[in-house]
Image (cartoon, rainbow, N blue to C red):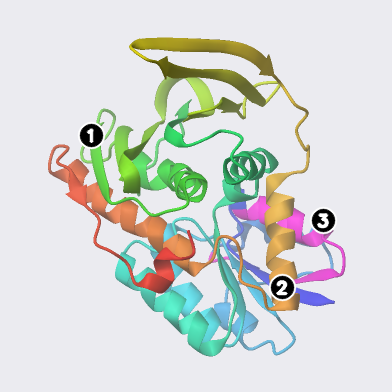
Amino acid sequence: MTNVGMVGAGRWGGNWIRTLAALPHTQLRWVCDVSPASFDKIRQQFPHVHTTTRLDDLLDDATLNGIVIATTAPTHFEVARKAIRAGKHVMVEKPMTLATADAVELTELADRTHRILMVGHLLEYHPVIRRIRGMIECGELGNVHYLYQQRLNLGTIRADENAWWSLAPHDISVANRLLGAAPISVQCRGQSIVKPNIADVVFAVLEYPGGRLAHVHVSWLDPHKSRKLVVVGSRKMVIFDDAADPKLLILDKRFHQDGEMIMLRHGQTTAPESDAAEPLALEAQHFIDCIRSGARPISDGQAGTMVVSVLEHGQRSLDQGGVIVPLPPLAPALRQSA
């Protein structure tokens, strides 16, 4: 039996609580939150779970193997650091931290103490993203020229973070995973429409080694909900629309040059069946499996550090009106995890 605790019982924390409680051979022992308002509901649904407003209750429990952190982003670094120092394995939600230096510190601390550090890059566990990554690795798509992603909705507007920090971590982590590298530069333009100095919409371009590009469009001020990824390869193209059915389309479309003539191919479009497994359940099970085996998570601290670096330097570009900001090289060990 693997014993875990939950820190943060808000909207997303509630999803984690439900998921952890349902995992086989796993016991959710603690739920911790600064506000006890949700504890009555938790006690009704999960009477075996202890509730507390004190993080130390979890840290002092010698039977607790791991802790999932779904608190507000500014608290991630300190809560995760305390948990790792207390000997707990940690799964911290995105963004991992608000500064690259803090992300590096957490990663190095986890490595020194031989603790699992996993970051909540949910889409890296989505069956369709895993399938697209497999198509890239086996050469089915050919060379990836570029990709673009949209994460749009009308609301929820936040007062403590902008759309870039709130929404883009998903898309940055996917781009890094599919392109197998960290970007070398980032350029962001945005608008603060509803509240001053809080960007509601951001358009970002990430440049990767080899001239490959990833475009990210995030907004909570858009008339329709969109969760879309398009990958353009030299052999095939794919469309992943998480709000559609079917979710995945594979398009046999490309161009090739015959002497002076450029030829376009419009081949068959297929819609393979997608695994219906819930990404959060897959992510949670992966964390538990890593605790049991000692394996390094897919979205480990190194992957989380890469995403934070892009966010931090993208914010600098946003603040400076869209200048291209080079990304400083991370330590070799961090780059290898992408």
Question: Mark 1 and 3 residues: CB-CB less than 8 Å, in contact?
Answer: no
Residue 148 percent coordinates (x, y):
43, 31
Residue type at the position of mark 3:
Gln
Horizontal and vertical percent position of residue 337: 49, 64
Query: Which mark lies nearer to you, 2 or 1?
Result: 1
Q: Secondary structure at mark 3?
A: helix
**Along the line of sight, which residue is nearer the eye, 244 or 274?**
274
Q: Viewed as shown, does residue 136 lie left or right of 255?
A: right
Left or right: where does residue 164 sit relative to residue 323?
right
Tell me the tag on residue 45: 3
Residue at position x 63%, y 44% in the image:
138
Residue closest to the far front? 259
Q: CA distance from mark 1 to mark 3?
A: 45 Å
Q: Position of residue 89 (x, y in %)?
A: 62, 77
**Disc 1 versus disc 3: nearer the observer:** 1
Amino acid type of the residue that numbered disc 2 sits on in the rendered structure: Val
The amino acid type found where label 1 is placed reads: Arg
| 217 vs 269: above or below | below
- Region of the chain picked out in magenta, as a range: 13-34
Percent x, y of residue 105: 38, 78
| Label 3 Cα neighbours within 10 Å, binned few <14 / some 14-19 / many ≥20 | few
Does label 1 or label 3 sit earlier along the sequence? 3
Q: Does the rendering let one see residue 122?
A: yes
Q: Foreground residue, 283 or 128?
A: 128
Q: Is residue 215 above or below residue 162?
A: above
User: Element type at marker 2?
Assistant: strand
Please name the residue that numbered disc 1 is placed on: 189
Label of residue 4 in the image: 2
